[in-house]
Image (spheres, rainbow, N blue to C red):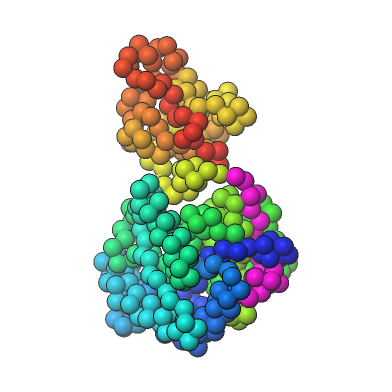
Amino acid sequence: MGAFAKEAKRLVIKFGTGLLTSGQAHLDFERIQGLCKAIASLHKQGFEVILVSSGSIGMGMKQLGLERRPTHMHTLQACASIGQNCLMDTWKKGFEPFDLTVAQLLLTHDDVRTRKRHVGIKNVLEELLKQKVIPIINENDSVSTEEIKFGDNDILSALVASLTKADLLAILSTVPGLLDLKGSGELIPVVETITPEIQAMAGGTTSPTAVGGMISKIHAAKVATRSGCNTFIGSGYDPQIIEQLASGSATGTLFMSKRLSMRSRKRWIAFFQKPQGTLTVDAGAQEALISQGKSLLAKGITQAEGTFKEGALVDILDTTGTTFARGIATYNNQDLRNILGSSSSAIQEQFPKRKRLEVIHRDSLVIL
């Protein structure tokens, strides 16, 4: 892993359900104790560590005598409600011998895509780290619905890493990293760019208690690396890997970020909201957005899809249908469809009281 991990001072570490349990959703306290010891060692060295921990639904399944992950939303919520208390109690006991205090944060996607709450979460995490507390984050599965779910904790961990401007995201599970299963079968140690070929190496999960698999881990790596955070995927069976992360000697797959500078507002636009619609633009508009840093004008838009209000987040597509940018629209979908391809002067005549004529201002637009 080289200097990328050695330079990291703020780490987000995500633990998968399969790593924290043995058998059918039985928390492996011995392994968790080992992980806590390794994290305490990093903490003593001055590292700031944030944990994203799965396992609450699995623990709830155990309490209810369920062998496979439920598909009904209310049953999943009940499992999470039952299991979360046990999960946090286990982490608390694991850190007690090292005199470390833990804090629980349960999040839904609404919490990070609503700007005011987004900032509030960032501030409380900064305060917890300042107070030398270990934040432990999980999705609030007991209240989450499809509309406000992250999807899985891999994506949640990437968003937390981006939110906190972490140096390194480590996704630890039962797999050693990204394997070239369609080729040599060997471990891929470093990924500089997540290409379609890299994505094709991924697979889902067959675990009865988990979701995601390598597909979601690569998706998480894409989010984290685009926001400037290196991402490591590896096995957490040996707790020593956590200290090896700090020394840069861990065995697994490192996804390298481009370390592009992105202001906090644009990070929020790029990664923390769900787009409500899409705008297709012509080649001239695409060039103006990418190469010239211009705002998006109605003249360059050829199509608008979806139902959205003024101030909604929308994806921007090129002529092939590929998403290359994202931004906050200043028109609702109905008004926008009435001005597609129109000049600014024509729009001014149609909306004489409008002060801003651009569809998306450059300050509210991110190239992905």
Height in image: 92 above or below 74?
below
Side of 237 where 154 appears, left or right:
left
Quadrant (top left/top right/bottom left/bottom right) for the N terminus: bottom right
The percent position of residue 127, horizontal first and vertical second, equals 43, 62
Question: Of residues 85 and 180, which is closer to you in this image?
Answer: 85
Image quarter for residue 322?
top right
Q: Is residue 276 magenta?
A: no
The percent position of residue 355, horizontal first and vertical second, equals 37, 20
Residue drawn at x 38%, y 29% is 330
Is residue 142 at all visible to an observer of this figure?
A: yes
* Magenta span: 242-261
Residue drawn at x 49%, y 77% is 18
Image quarter for residue 199?
bottom right
Height in image: 46 above or below 359?
below
Question: Of residues 279 and 248, which is closer to you in this image?
Answer: 248
Image quarter for residue 166?
bottom right
Question: Of residues 204 and 261, which is closer to you in this image?
Answer: 261
Is residue 25 at all visible to an observer of this figure?
A: no
Question: Of residues 243 and 40, which is closer to you in this image?
Answer: 40
